[in-house]
Amino acid sequence: MKRLIMLFFVTAGFAAAAPSPPGLIANVHARTTVSLNGTWHVIIDPYETGLQYRYYENRKPKDKQELVEYDFDASGTLNVPGDWNSQRESLLFYEGSVWYERSFSYHRDELARTFLYFGAANYQARVYLNGKAIGEHQGGFTPFNFEITNDVRDGDNFVVVEVNNARRGDSVPALNTDWWNYGGLTRDVAIVEVPATFIQDYFVQLAKGSQSEIAGWVKLNGATQPEQVTIEIPEANLAQRVTTDRDGYAEFKFAAKLQLWSLDNPKLYRVTLSGAGDRVEEQIGFRTIETRGTKILLNGKPIFLRGISMHEEAPFRGGRAFSPEDDAILLGWARELGCNFVRLAHYPYNEAMIRLADRMGILVWEEIPVYWDIDWKNAATLQFAEEQMGDLIARDHNRAAAIFWSIGNETPIAPARVEFMKQLVGYTRGLDSTRLVTAALNRPESPDANTRLLNDPLGEFLDVLGLNEYVGWYDGTIPSLDALQWKTAYEKPLIVSEFGAETPFGAHGSADARWTEEYQSSLYEHQIAMLRKIPSLAGMSPWVLMDFRSPRRPLPGVQDFYNRKGLISDRGQRKQAFYTLQKFYRELAAAPPN
Ligand code: GCB
């Protein structure tokens, strides 16, 4: 049996060392692309028969004798981007493998190098072009690309992708989450064309702690000799030339007089990088973010983060959000609520969302799905987490809006977990030392009935402490909030990254009756009164902007597989608590606490 399995893998071209994705191409949408979005044929494959029967060959029987037990063309279709769960009733709870196929005709430009780009595929993707294995990727929320220069044909081509969202104990996230495990090609798919030597990635940001100096690097792909690259910001009269090393890499640092990106004026500069026969253009904002004691400083000034936690779920139509329209509604609601900050829980969102936050002047907490309990002792699991953080940072490291890299949510206090998270902090800082590292913690001690002490050992390694607390919902009563005092063991800024209560929109009753809008609103009032008393509080992001689907929430007539802690229903109806928080945020905006 073992031999047989090995055989399948070898046939499929994915032996143990399947090619992992090469470095991401930054700012893909500024490149020449051919979109592969649209209708794809799909075969649902709960038993993973596709590998054995080689669905990736997309065969037709050559005569009336040949046995071919699948047919993409006669199977159904799904839209890409889009999860499968919300597109077909029968797939709502489906977890497993789905094979996607799309044919396309392509005109080969002999000078160009060609890549196949995926905005995200949840969770594991195996990619084939014209029957050949091209690459494999794990992690449901980060982009990846594979070079297909030598495999794409002039004329007809077909791409087949097996996407598998089966939960696994060693993956990130692991087996248990409080969100829907939307599977599929959930974000854009495109062919990307670049020159033989191209600017693969670059970091153009203010030097850490400086408002007048740009520091960064540029990385070429395909360079065979040192090359000159020029970084220009025409509006600021800046042009800096650097020479890359043998690996196509160069660092730079130069003085710059810039108008800073801020919440009131989210100024973005047109930045161009050119050299080695390539040119790429960007919109980049420049700001500093740091901490001093228990304060968070934006451009050197203390700021209080009026936030809301979110899920990347589409308003009105449901399913995983992916479009500019979805992003605009969600961030528009946050703005209406009075937010200057959003926590994009619990995984990386689509890139356009962060770019929109950049343009709107909304600060962003980005997170990877190290969620609850995962396989802390497994080196492969740490690698999966690092890959997701690495890809997230590679994608968003030029976004002014992104200020926090969150390494996880509500992880248990245990030595193996602290060790794992410590490594992840180091890895994250090694990739980007200009942003703040945080995590949502949730295991305070109770030295006495009215005191909670956040002393999680992980706190020592973070720049900013996130705290999820559900006093008044999972923990104690609403009145118990009034006498409660919060302390932390670290002289660091604290963000209460979650609190909340659940109610369907339109459910009314007394303020002490669960599952009513009155209860939720009352909880917000008492929470706000309690939070006002925490001296180190630097911000908050209650749970959650909009109701979202969760397989853990079955209560009929109330939840119906939705987590109803939204301030807004999935149909866009604002609950009472929306206005309670909005009132507080208006007061804060008028008279900031710092
Ligand atoms: C939490 C989790 C979040 C859940 C939320 C809840 O602490 O971080 O993912 O959805 O509580 O509603 O229980």
Image: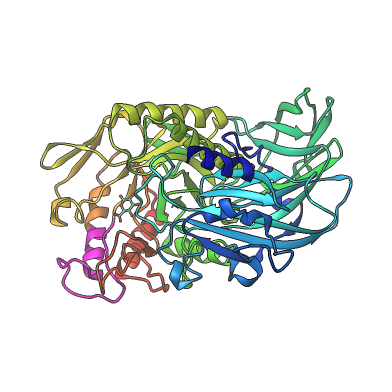
Q: Going 52% across and 36% down the picture, which residue do you hit? A: 435
In the picture as drawn, the residue positioned furthest to the top comes out as 246
In this figure, which colouring scheme has been used for the structure?
Answer: rainbow
User: Does residue 397 appear in this view?
Assistant: no
Q: Is residue 68 in sight in this rendering? A: yes
Q: Residue at the location (27% across, 68% down)? A: 503
Vertical arrangement, residue 238 with respect to residue 176, above or below = above
Residue 426 against residue 50 in the figure, above or below: above
Residue drawn at the location 74% of the way across and 64% of the way down: 62
Where's residue 216, x and y in %? 67, 31
Q: Does the magenta portion include 254? A: no
The answer to which quarter of the image holds residue 299 is top right
* Of the pair 251 and 103, the residue shown nearer to us: 103
- Where is residue 452? Give x, y as percent: 19, 39
In reply to whether residue 505 is colored magenta, the answer given is: yes
Horizontal and vertical percent position of residue 235: 76, 45
How many tags in the picture? 0
Judging depth in this view, the residue of 468 and 552 nearest the camera is 552
Looking at this view, name the residue that lies furthest to the front.
65
- Whether residue 433 sits left or right of residue 424 in the image: it is right
Front in this rendered view, residue 233 or 273: 273
For the record, the magenta segment spans 500-525
Residue 446 vs residue 338: left or right? left
Residue 260 in the image, given as x and y percentages of width and height: 61, 43
In the rendered image, the vertical position of residue 550 relative to residue 173, given as above or below: below
Residue drawn at 40 percent across, 55 percent down: 308
Prevailing secondary structure class for the magenta stretch in the rendered image: loop
Front residue of 247/74: it is 74
In terms of image quadrants, where is residue 156?
Answer: bottom right
Image quarter in which the C terminus is found = top left
